[in-house]
Amino acid sequence: MRPLHSIYVPTFILSVFVLCLPIAGAGQLNLDNEGVAISGYDPVSYHLKTGAQKGRRNLLLTHNGSIYYFVSSDNRALFMKDPERYTPAFGGWCAWAMLDGETVEIDPQTYKLVNNKTYLFYNSFFSNTLNKWNTLAQETGEQSLSNQAESA
């Protein structure tokens, strides 16, 4: 029979190691397994009358570690001229969750432009966080929410 310390010591060391691992935060990007941002949606399309549109794999561009797909070469050119304008806020994570400093997946078709920046939101089943954001923004103001999400 093995001594108790030979069982508990490795378990303790493993526990300490796991607790010290970095937790996904606002500084990390919301990318799929291939490094694609916004579930493959064109980041420029959010700023156009067309609204959110799925980009094409053959029209891609890599920026700051993220791969973006575009619906047209014109949109890709607009992005290249001013990428900071078109990259989504909070690394592409849900803006509502960022109020608490949490990273939550998004529905790329649920979004809002705030100060000319794309804010993405979680929307599934009975929870549309864009509606929650809008309700709270009426009470506290859009800028107040934006500031809170940025500082969380």
Image (cartoon, helix red, strand yellow):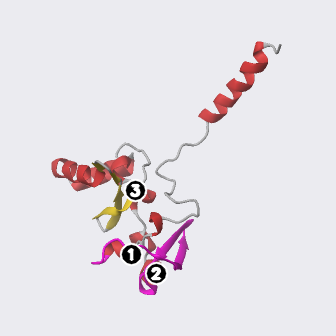
Question: Residue 60 or 109: which is nearer the viewer?
Answer: 109
Instruction: State which region is magenta.
Output: 48-76
Residue assigned mark 1: 44
Of all residues, the one furthest to the left in this rendering is 139
Label located before the other in sequence (3 or 2): 2
Query: Is 2 situated left or right of 62 in this image?
Result: right
Residue mark closest to the camera, 3 vs 1:
3
Disc assigned to residue 76: 2
Question: Residue 151 or 110: which is nearer the viewer?
Answer: 110
- Residue 64 visible from this viewpoint: no
Q: Residue at x 42, y 55 (%)?
A: 93
Of all residues, the one furthest to the right in this rendering is 1
Query: Is 41 rendered above or below residue 96?
Result: below
Tag 1: residue type?
Answer: Val
Residue assigned mark 3: 106
- Kindly report the distance in space between the C-alpha atoms of the residues bearing marks 2 and 1: 8 Å
Tag 3: residue type?
Answer: Ile
Disc assigned to residue 11: none
Q: Residues within 10 Å of mark 2 (few under 14, many from 20)?
A: many
Label located before the other in sequence (3 or 1): 1
Judged from the image, the secondary structure of the residue bearing numbered disc 2 is helix
Figure quadrant of residue 38: bottom left
**Coordinates of residue 29 in the picture (x, y in percent):** 50, 57
Query: Is 16 situated left or right of 1 in this image?
Result: left
Figure quadrant of residue 41: bottom left
The answer to whether mark 2 and mark 1 are in CB contact below 8 A is: yes
Query: Is 120 situated left or right of 145 in this image?
Result: right
**Does the magenta segment cover residue 16?**
no
- Kindly report the distance in space between the C-alpha atoms of the residues bearing marks 3 and 2: 22 Å
